[in-house]
Amino acid sequence: MNSDEWIIHLTELRKRLIWVMLFFIVTLAAGLYMSPQVLLYIKNRPAAAGIAWNVFSLTDGMFIYMKCGFLVAVFFTLPLALYHIWAFVRPGLTAEEAKKTFCFIPLAFVLFIIGAAFSFYVAFPMMVSFLSQMNKTVGAVETYGMDKYFSLLFSVVFPLSLAFEMPAVVLFLTRLGILGPALLKKARKYVYLVLAIVGSMISPPDFVSHLSVTIPLIMLFELSILVSGWYMRKKETSNPLIDPKGGASHV
C-alpha cells in the first residue's frame, strides 16, 4: 500500500470518527437531559430500597449526573460505532463476507443489552443484598455515599455488558479462521484463570459477589466454544477443506 492509499484510508477513518463523535455529543446532551429520570429509576429499584443516598462532597451529585449521561451516550452510540467499523473494513471484504459480517452489528448490540440487563437486574442486586446483610451481621450502621453506590453500580454493569460480547467476538474470529473450538478448549484453564481475575477486579471483595460475576463470565466462554464449534461444523459440511479441530486447512 503506497502513501496515497494510506492517506485515503486515514481520511476515511477520520471522517467516520467525526461522525461517531458528533453523534456521541448529541446523545451525551440527551443523556444529561435524561439523567434525573434514569437516576430516579435506579433509586426506586429494589436493590436501592431503604438505602439513603448521602453526598459527602458538593461535587458528588454533579459527577454522578455526568457519569449517567456518559453511559447513556455510550449505550446509544455503540450501534453506530459498530456500523462504522464494519463500513471501514467493507471495501476489503467480498460481497458474501460483507453480508455475513454485517449481522455482527445487531448481534453485538443485543448481547450488550442482555449483559446490561443481567448485571443491573440480577448480579448487582445480589451484591447489594449480600453486602448489606454482612454489614447488618456485624452491627454496622449503613450510611452510603451516592458516589460510592454508583461507582459500584457502574463498575459492575459496564464491564459485564462488554463481557457479554464474548460469543460475538469469538464467532467473528472463528469466521476469520483465527480461532476454533479446539484452540479454545486447549486454552480453557488459562481463560478460566483470567476470567476469575477479571471477576475479582470488577466485583466487591467477597466470595458471593465474586461468584456472581465470575460464573456468568465462564458460562459465556463455554457458550463461545459451542458457538465456535457450531460454525466450524456448519463450514465443514459445505467445505471439506475446513479442519473441524480448529481452523481452516491449508492446501
Image: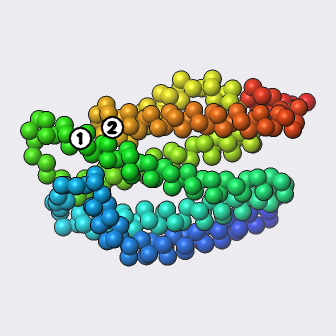
Q: Is residue 174 above or below residue 76?
A: above
Mark positioned earlier in the residue sequence (1 or 2)? 1
Image coordinates for residue 227, horizontal then vertical, percent: 66, 38
Q: Name the residue under label 2.
A: 209
Residue at (38% x, 37% y) in the render:
212
Tell me the amino acid under the disc marked 1: Leu
Observer able to see residue 66: no
Circle 1/circle 2 CB separation < 8 Å: yes
- Quarter of the picture containing the N terminus is bottom right
Q: In which quarter of the image is the C terminus?
A: top right
Tell me the tag on residue 131: 1
Helix, strand or loop at mark 2: helix
Q: Quadrant of residue 2?
A: bottom right
In this view, 248 is above or below 12: above
SS for callout 1: helix
Whole-angstrom CA distance, mark 1 to mark 2, is: 8 Å
